[in-house]
């Protein structure tokens, strides 16, 4: 049976209607980066920025060009740590959330 919606359309619709889903996209992106999975972190941030259409607002907040942010989270993007942390912080501000780091011993 063929899908009636693309994955991207589904993610966008959910992100636009569900604040918790948006927060989880940012949270999972942050966790992926902290776990060393840069590709997944960038992909999740890219999904967040595309789905929420927050890119122009975040670009203005960071005083950066939209295209620069798109390249930063693109497949071949290589953001500096400073730029990446600023982007995560801006996404948190956009969603009015704050993350706290918790140490877990294995």
Image (spheres, rainbow, N blue to C red):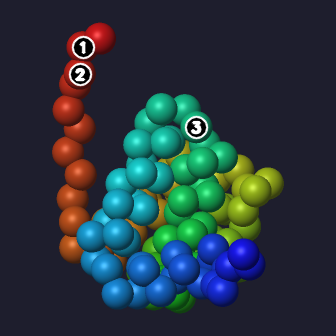
Q: Quadrant of residue 88?
A: bottom left
Badge 1 crowding class, 10 Å Cα cut-off, few under 14, some 14 to 19, many 20 or more, is few
- Label 2 close to label 1 by CB (< 8 Å): yes
Which is more N-terminal, label 3 or label 1? Answer: 3
Of 60 and 99, the residue lying toward us = 99
Measuring 42% from the left and 79% from the top, which residue is drawn there?
Answer: 15
Q: Position of residue 63 (x, y in %)?
A: 51, 79
Q: CA distance from mark 1 to mark 3?
A: 20 Å
Residue 104, labelled with which disc?
Answer: 2
Q: Residue furthest front?
A: 1
Query: Does 75 appear above or below 95?
Result: above
Q: Secondary structure at mark 2?
A: loop
Which is more N-terminal, label 2 or label 3? Answer: 3
Q: Is residue 100 left or right of residue 2?
A: left
Q: Secondary structure at mark 1?
A: loop
Residue position marked by numbered label 3 in the rendering: 37
Q: CA distance from mark 3 to mark 2?
A: 18 Å
Q: Position of residue 1 (x, y in %)?
A: 72, 75
Measuring 54% from the left and 59% from the top, which residue is drawn there?
Answer: 44
Q: Position of residue 66 (x, y in %)?
A: 63, 82
Measuring 67% from the left and 62% from the top, which residue is drawn there?
Answer: 72
Q: Quadrant of the C terminus?
A: top left
Q: Residue furthest top?
A: 106
Q: Is residue 96 visible?
A: yes
Residue position marked by numbered label 1 in the rendering: 105
Q: Is residue 59 left or right of residue 66?
A: left
Measuring 63% from the left and 74% from the top, which residue is drawn there?
Answer: 7
Q: Residue furthest right?
A: 76
Q: Is residue 93 visible?
A: no
């Amino acid at each position: 049976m063929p899908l009636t919606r693309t994955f991207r359309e589904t993610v966008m619709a959910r992100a636009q209607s569900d604040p918790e889903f948006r927060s989880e996209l940012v949270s999972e992106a942050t966790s992926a980066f902290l776990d060393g999975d840069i590709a997944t972190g960038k992909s999740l941030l890219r999904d967040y920025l595309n789905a929420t259409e927050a890119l122009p607002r975040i670009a203005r907040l960071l005083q950066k060009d939209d295209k620069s942010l798109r390249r930063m989270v693109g497949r071949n993007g290589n953001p500096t740590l400073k730029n990446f942390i600023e982007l995560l912080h801006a996404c948190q501000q956009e969603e009015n959330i704050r993350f706290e780091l918790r140490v877990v011993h294995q």
